[in-house]
Image: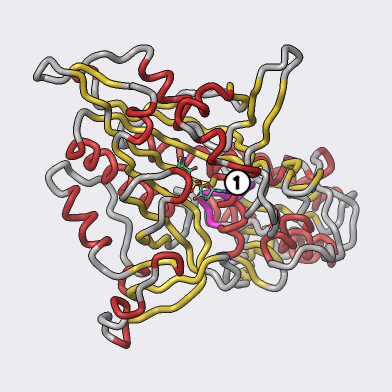
């Protein structure tokens, strides 16, 4: 992408209402624009990151056999009346009336709708298990939308739903999602810690939240230090599933809502970690809470009807954009992990209009594009200082700077954003160096 052909409205000043780094940088880097409280326009740069995160979430869901679908944002109130949640959800739910006075709502989640969908097709245990997900916008009329996309009113969620014949099978489904979450967050460059959680308005008796540790997190967390540094499990066989989950769930990890000081005190003192965290995912096992209310049963091997056992599994896809920035930035701007960076590398032309510099930049741009790096070429006629500041702000992992002086000696500058390290090398070596980083 050529910057002259892109839409990147960067801001010099930090907007006064943005108090945390991710919110400030997302506004300044031209990733989002607030349209009204908690509702954002995703500008091209932000949209690109959002889509990359979405794709990693999708791949890890597919890997555990979850099947993608798409449910609408607007739901009929009828499903919610059947489960009793129409009243229970309260003022967080955005209620809508259509021209025929029918009650609709903008979905804050989809348990009720998918249980209705499920019962109209599935009749036998032979058609189980089922594990379905979608990635769709939600609306929750939060009392205090804040921190930009971290606590929005409209936000993008991956929500999966599992259907099984009995609690044991449902536990397997829960464990698979648990593993998928660890792998997903690791690919996003995050250390997410699973913590025992309260189930809130979703209901049920088994639940884990996944939190990334950050000073600006909304939750206070208490956990065993070893959990933070455990590496992602990767592919886990059916035989090892429960063990791998157990290693993570046997160590103490709770948010303030579930915290028990005397239990935490049993953790060796040098392993006790008290910190703040951002909830990026939440999984629930709630058995027959919805299937019973909606009479969603299948015929079991015994010939009798059984209410299906269910779980639901959410990831805050749009919140993750902010969460990843909280975990990776410095005073100059964002530092993207390679897996979700909007562009692989930036190319800075220090003298637009100089024939030799223009030609070298074009050549590097074409070669990096052909190598699949998806570079952003700053071909605008701005001052060098402005170009460097803008490139640091938007946080691409690598920058190549090409100027007339270096070029005379046959070299360009390559900067690694995360470390600030700069190296001079030939244009060809620069292309090879950057390409190697993405294999
Ligand atoms: N139905 C269940 C699981 S599918 C559910 O709705 N769970 S949830 O309420 O915990 O939401 C799932 C995830 O969405 C959260 O972990 C969080 O990362 C994200 N999320 C929730 N509320 C917001 C919000 N207001 N803004 C941004 N992300 C949010």
Query: Who is closer to the viewer here, 86 or 11?
Result: 86
Q: Is residue 292 above or below residue 226?
A: above
Say which residue label 1 marks. 318
Magenta region:
337-343
Left or right relative to 205: residue 186? right
Q: Position of residue 148 (x, y in %)?
A: 70, 55
Residue lying farthest bottom? 269
Query: Who is closer to the viewer here, 169 or 384?
Result: 169
Q: Residue at x 59, y 51 (%)?
A: 319
Magenta stretch contains residue 340: yes
Q: Position of residue 190 (x, y in %)?
A: 46, 59
Quarter of the image containing the N terminus?
Answer: top right
Magenta stretch contains residue 181: no
Left or right relative to 239: residue 99? right
Q: Position of residue 177 (x, y in %)?
A: 33, 43
Q: Residue at x 26, y 13 (%)?
A: 123
Whether residue 279 is visible, yes or no, is yes
């Amino acid at each position: 992408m050529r910057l002259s052909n892109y839409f990147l409205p960067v801001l010099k000043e930090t907007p006064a209402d943005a108090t945390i780094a991710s919110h400030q940088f997302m506004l300044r880097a031209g990733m989002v624009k607030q349209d009204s409280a908690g509702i954002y326009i995703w500008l091209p740069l932000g949209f690109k990151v959002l889509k990359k995160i979405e794709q990693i979430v999708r791949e890890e869901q597919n890997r555990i056999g979850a099947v993608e679908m798409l449910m609408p944002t607007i739901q009929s109130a009828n499903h919610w009346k059947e489960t009793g949640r129409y009243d229970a959800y309260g003022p967080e739910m955005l209620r809508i009336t259509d021209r025929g006075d029918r009650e609709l709502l903008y979905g804050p989640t989809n348990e009720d709708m998918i249980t209705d969908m499920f019962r109209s097709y599935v009749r036998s245990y032979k058609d189980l298990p089922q594990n379905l997900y979608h990635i769709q916008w939600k609306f929750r009329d939060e009392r205090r939308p804040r921190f930009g996309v971290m606590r929005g009113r409209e936000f993008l969620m991956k929500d999966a739903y599992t259907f099984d014949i009995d609690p044991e099978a449902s536990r397997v489904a829960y464990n698979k999602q648990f593993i998928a979450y660890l792998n997903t967050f690791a690919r996003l460059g995050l250390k997410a810690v699973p913590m025992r959680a309260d189930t809130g308005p979703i209901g049920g008796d088994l639940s884990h939240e996944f939190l990334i540790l950050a000073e600006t997190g909304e939750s206070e967390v208490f956990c065993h230090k070893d959990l933070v540094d455990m590496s992602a499990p990767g592919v886990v066989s059916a035989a090892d599933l429960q063990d791998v989950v157990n290693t993570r769930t046997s160590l103490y990890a709770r948010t303030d809502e579930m915290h028990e000081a005397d239990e935490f005190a049993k953790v060796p003192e040098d392993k006790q970690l008290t910190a703040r965290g951002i909830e990026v995912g939440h999984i629930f096992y709630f058995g027959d809470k919805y299937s019973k209310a909606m009479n969603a049963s299948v015929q079991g091997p015994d010939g009798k009807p059984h209410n299906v056992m269910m779980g639901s599994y959410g990831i805050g896809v749009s919140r993750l954009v902010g969460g990843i920035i909280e975990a990776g930035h410095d005073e100059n701007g964002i530092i993207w992990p390679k897996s979700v960076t909007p562009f692989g590398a930036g190319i800075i032309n220090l003298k637009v209009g100089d024939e030799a510099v223009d030609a070298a930049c074009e050549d590097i741009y074409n070669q990096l594009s052909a190598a699949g790096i998806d570079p952003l070429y700053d071909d605008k006629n701005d001052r060098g200082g402005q170009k460097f500041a803008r490139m640091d702000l938007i946080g691409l992992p690598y920058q190549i700077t090409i100027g007339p002086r270096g070029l005379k000696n046959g070299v360009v500058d390559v900067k690694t954003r995360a470390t600030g390290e700069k190296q001079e090398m030939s244009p060809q070596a620069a292309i090879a160096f950057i390409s190697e980083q993405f294999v």
